[in-house]
Image: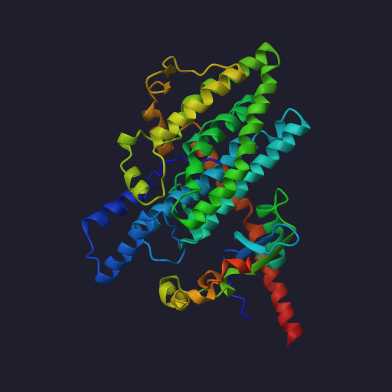
């Protein structure tokens, strides 16, 4: 589901990249030739596959982006998982379980894609659990009631789909292939959320008010999911050059706004932005200012649920340690038994 | 076969046959403690919507692969043998489809 289209530096990255810049390395003739080959492949819209030569910065950017994306899927299971036991019907419960299981699956596809770049699952999980690695800040907000679950499907997954469809054409083969699989499954997520809200909007005045309240709380956070404005995204140009990023943050955000306005109308809710209006000249909607200070404060660990999410994730990992060890011990025992029988 | 002390579950490559009559196709990889476990995980991770009727799992470490950076030398010998393609041969039109 849910990437944020920007790839924010993980906590330890800044110092490292500063060091790299301080000591520029002279590229050998061989490296220059490999770089030229790589550039030509990218220019021809070709794909890069694991074990092929690639610039270190390309590899590092991908590891960071794909692992952040994977972490987002895994942490993204938490706010919705909260509601599995409280879903209003057996049908909604089965749907929500299937959706949360999909998110876990998406995380697994993405971790595997990142591992083809030479990082390990343990390294990535360690970075998540120690708070070094970032994940989508949208999950650091609470899901207060059932309407939030519907709005997450409609708006959060809707924003994620906008982000993820261009990633299916990413220059790195394993990431692109994982995204094709993710996108196929994602449309169910958005539709089930929207449909759950349609049902609520046919309910009592109180239920309708719950939907409107949830939309009001999530709308601006969803717009921020696309990342900082193009002017403040210094890494975007490099990502575009490498064929990792295909559409700019602002263009994706605009597409999302334009797609969502008519959906809100059909649903019968308003979007909480007095500046939102159709611009005949641009043939697109104008919209108001996003609160970037609030966004960065959440990215940097001070959102309402950062500690709770990470705490729940670390607890699940620690509580599962004995299962992981027991499975390995069992497989080792089986192997030894086979060896003894063979001898 | 040695049994090294591992912290991570080993990596497996997953191949899925989407329906009878088609080949198994690589669809990704996953970590699992042994082959049986890998098959169950592959079912859950890669066939949640009836995408398969048969699954193979192969320990990733046992796959031998051609060297990507030797691609030109490895595959070059076939590139100048155009006579291996049917379009290399001109046949009179009156012969019809051949």
A157 on left or right of A199: left
Which quadrant of the rendered structure holds the C terminus of chain A?
A: bottom right
* Residue at the front extreme, as displayed: B94
A323 on left or right of A306: right
* Colour setting: rainbow
Reply above or below: B33 against A251: below
Reply above or below: A226 against A270: below
* Residue at the top extreme, as displayed: A205
* Residue B82 appears in the figure: yes
Q: Residue at x 53, y 40 (%)?
A: A2
Q: Which residue is drawn at 45% across and 47% down?
A: A131
Q: Camera-side residue: A139 or A267? A: A267
The number of discs equals 0
Which quadrant of the rendered structure holds the N terminus of chain A?
A: top right
Reply above or below: B71 against A191: below
Q: Which residue is drawn at 41% across and 71% down?
A: B69
Q: Where is residue A181 in the image (x, y as percent from the top left)?
A: 59, 49
Q: Position of residue A145 (x, y in %)?
A: 63, 25
A299 on left or right of A332: left
B22 on left or right of B7: right
Q: Camera-side residue: A120 or A333? A: A120
Q: Camera-side residue: A283 or A312? A: A283
Q: Position of residue A97 (x, y in %)?
A: 70, 40
* Residue A302 appears in the figure: no
Q: Position of residue A3 (x, y in %)?
A: 49, 42
């Amino acid at each position: 589901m849910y990437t944020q289209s920007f790839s924010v530096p993980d906590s330890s990255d800044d110092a490292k990249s500063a060091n790299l810049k301080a000591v520029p390395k002279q590229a050998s003739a061989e490296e220059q030739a490999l770089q030229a080959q790589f550039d030509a492949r990218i220019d021809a819209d070709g794909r890069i596959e694991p074990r092929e030569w690639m610039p270190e910065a390309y590899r590092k950017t991908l590891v960071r982006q794909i692992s952040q994306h994977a972490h987002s899927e895994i942490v993204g299971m938490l706010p919705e998982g909260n509601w599995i036991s409280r879903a209003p019907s057996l049908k909604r419960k089965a749907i929500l379980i299937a959706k949360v299981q999909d998110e876990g699956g998406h995380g697994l596809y993405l971790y595997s894609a990142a591992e083809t770049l030479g990082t390990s699952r343990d390294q990535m999980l360690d970075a998540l659990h120690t708070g070094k690695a970032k994940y989508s800040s949208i999950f650091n907000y609470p899901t207060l009631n059932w309407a939030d679950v519907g709005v997450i499907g409609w708006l959060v997954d809707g924003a994620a789909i906008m982000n993820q469809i261009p990633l299916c054409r990413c220059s790195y083969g394993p990431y692109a292939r994982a995204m094709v699989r993710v996108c196929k499954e994602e449309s169910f997520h958005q539709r089930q959320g929207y449909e759950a809200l349609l049902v609520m909007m046919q309910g009592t005045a109180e239920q309708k008010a719950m939907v409107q309240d949830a939309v009001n709380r999530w709308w601006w956070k969803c717009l921020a999911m696309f990342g900082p404005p193009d002017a403040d995204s210094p890494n975007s140009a490099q990502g575009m050059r490498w064929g990792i990023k295909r559409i700019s943050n602002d263009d994706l955000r605009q597409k999302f706004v334009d797609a969502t306005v008519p959906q809100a109308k059909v649903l019968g809710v308003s979007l909480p932005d007095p500046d939102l209006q159709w611009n005949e000249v641009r043939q697109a909607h104008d919209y108001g200012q996003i609160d970037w200070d609030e966004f960065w404060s959440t990215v940097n660990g001070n959102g309402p649920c950062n500690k709770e999410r990470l705490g729940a994730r670390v607890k699940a990992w620690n509580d599962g340690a004995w299962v992981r060890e027991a499975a390995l011990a069992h497989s080792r025992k089986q192997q030894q038994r086979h060896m003894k029988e063979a001898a | 076969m040695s049994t090294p002390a591992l912290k991570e579950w080993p990596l497996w490559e997953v191949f899925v046959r989407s329906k009878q009559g088609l080949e198994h196709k690589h669809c990704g990889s996953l970590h699992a403690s042994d082959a049986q476990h890998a098959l169950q995980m592959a079912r859950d991770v890669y066939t949640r919507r009836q995408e398969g009727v048969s699954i193979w799992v192969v320990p990733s470490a046992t796959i031998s692969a051609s060297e990507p950076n030797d691609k030109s030398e490895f595959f070059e010998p076939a590139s100048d043998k155009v006579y291996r393609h049917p379009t290399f041969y001109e046949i009179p039109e009156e012969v019809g489809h051949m």
